[in-house]
Image: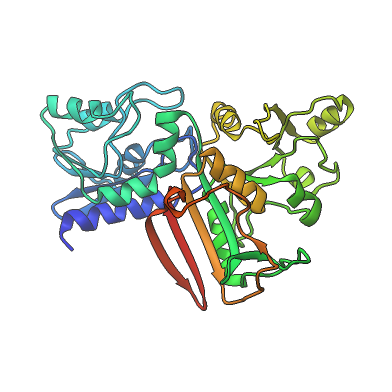
């Protein structure tokens, strides 16, 4: 491993510490190096708090290290525009007399995208872009989707048997996956802003939809697809979370709407599509306006099919357990209306991870 890779790897590791905490901002890490020694490091901890570069400068100051003439490794192009919460980092880098800036990836934000690098070079600072770029892009894939489309990055997560069933024919699904697999699922929850399920899941399982990792985390906002407002007021997700979102096409139950709002629920009225299902594209647009940058779908086979058919899914994460239940079991994905293999949905850039005797497969649509 050369030094550039080593220092950028450290910056990426720092950035990942804030997983699930920075939305709607990206995760960013920064490392300041002078004479082949790290003299300052930091990461963006939360929206509204100092950016990674500033945290690294403050760390160097605290250690009484001079940053003049040093190099800084940053996982994302330094910002060059005034933000609502924080000043631009390019100005500080220039002011601190940094000599070189190494950037993993350009900022996909149209307000920045190359302009930060341009300003640095115009001020005599050497800039190199592209060190561990692929890893940086994966780290902030949700931010990239959100900042360029104003819609959330959507992950479809399903846990199934080896023969692709999410439940036995009786509807029993507890537990398909092992405790280790469920821990991975909670790590996924910890990365996203919202977690989406259908009404049937709420009625059948009464899920809490929180993150249980044994450490302090930020819970995602529950999002329930509930056309007819059937969700019980005593549901766990309504009483555990301070905030939830109910997507519905029926606002006729005004009394229940008020009671749901009293429990912290935001009610989004969504049109129905030609099949009588909620228009998920419209829902994603509205969620984007609420600064929800990423959504994890954990619904059943019908919700999975609706999400795939609507084209809102960006990434799939499928867990397979070493169990077989047979053809009468409930398939992991409902009807898609695909008549030929040629018309099937294609998953690209797949990765496979073994979890003891279980398998996790992830890929992109």
Q: Nearer the viewer, residue 250 or 238?
A: 250
Q: Quadrant of the N terminus?
A: bottom left
Q: Is residue 220 left or right of residue 365?
A: right
Q: Nearer the viewer, residue 272 or 238?
A: 272
Residue at x 62% of width, y 32% of height:
279
- Image coordinates for residue 302, horizontal then vertical, percent: 66, 49
Q: Is residue 297 left or right of residue 91?
A: right
Residue at x 51% of width, y 36% of height:
152
Whether residue 331 is situated above or below residue 264 in the rendered picture: below
Q: Nearer the viewer, residue 80 or 203?
A: 203
The single residue placed furthest to the right in the displayed view is 255
Quarter of the image where one finds residue 174? bottom right
Question: What is the tally of numbered marks visible in this picture?
Answer: 0
| Residue 301 shows in this picture | yes
Whether residue 302 is situated above or below residue 124 in the rendered picture: below
| Residue 218 shows in this picture | no
Q: Is residue 114 left or right of residue 259?
A: left
- Image coordinates for residue 343, horizontal then vertical, percent: 45, 48
Whether residue 315 is situated above or below residue 93 in the rendered picture: below
Q: Is residue 177 left or right of residue 347?
A: right
Residue at x 46% of width, y 51% of height:
344
Residue at x 64% of width, y 59% of height:
212
The single residue placed furthest to the front in the displayed view is 339
Which color scheme did the rendering employ for the protein? rainbow
- Image coordinates for residue 129, horizontal then vertical, percent: 19, 41
- Image coordinates for residue 351, horizontal then vertical, percent: 39, 62
Whether residue 98 is situated above or below residue 218 in the rendered picture: above
């Amino acid at each position: 491993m050369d030094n550039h890779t080593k220092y950028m790897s450290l910056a990426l590791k720092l950035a990942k510490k804030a997983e699930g905490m920075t939305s709607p901002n990206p995760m960013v890490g920064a490392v300041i190096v002078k004479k082949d020694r790290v003299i300052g490091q930091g990461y963006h901890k939360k929206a509204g708090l100092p950016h990674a570069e500033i945290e690294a400068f403050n760390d160097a100051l605290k250690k009484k290290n001079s940053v003049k003439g040093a190099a800084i490794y940053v996982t994302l192009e330094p910002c060059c525009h005034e933000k609502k919460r924080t000043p631009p980092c390019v100005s500080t880098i220039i002011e601190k007399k940094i000599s070189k800036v190494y950037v993993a990836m350009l900022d996909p934000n149209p307000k920045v995208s190359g302009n930060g690098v341009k300003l640095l070079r115009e001020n005599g600072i050497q800039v190199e872009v592209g060190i561990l770029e692929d890893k940086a892009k994966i780290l902030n894939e949700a931010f990239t989707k959100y900042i360029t489309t104003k819609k959330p990055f959507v992950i479809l997560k399903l846990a199934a048997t080896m023969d692709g069933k999410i439940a036995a024919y009786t509807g029993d699904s507890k537990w398909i996956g092992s405790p280790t697999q469920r821990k991975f699922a909670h790590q996924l929850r910890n990365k996203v802003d919202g977690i989406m399920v259908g009404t049937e899941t709420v009625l059948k399982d009464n899920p809490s939809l929180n993150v249980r990792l044994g450490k302090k985390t930020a819970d995602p906002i529950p999002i329930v697809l509930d056309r007819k407002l059937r969700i019980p007021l005593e549901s766990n997700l309504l009483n555990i979370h301070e905030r939830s979102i109910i997507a519905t096409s029926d606002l006729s139950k005004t009394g229940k709407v008020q009671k749901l709002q009293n429990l912290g629920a935001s009610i989004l009225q969504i049109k129905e599509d030609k099949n009588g299902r909620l228009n998920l594209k419209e829902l994603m647009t509205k969620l984007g306006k609420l600064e929800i940058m990423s959504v994890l779908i954990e619904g059943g086979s019908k919700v999975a099919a609706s999400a795939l058919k609507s084209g809102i899914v960006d990434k799939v994460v499928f867990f397979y357990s070493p169990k077989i239940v047979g053809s009468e079991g409930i398939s992991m994905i409902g009807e898609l209306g695909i008549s030929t293999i040629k018309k099937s949905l294609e998953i690209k850039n797949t990765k496979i991870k073994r979890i003891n005797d279980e398998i996790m497969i992830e890929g992109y649509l």
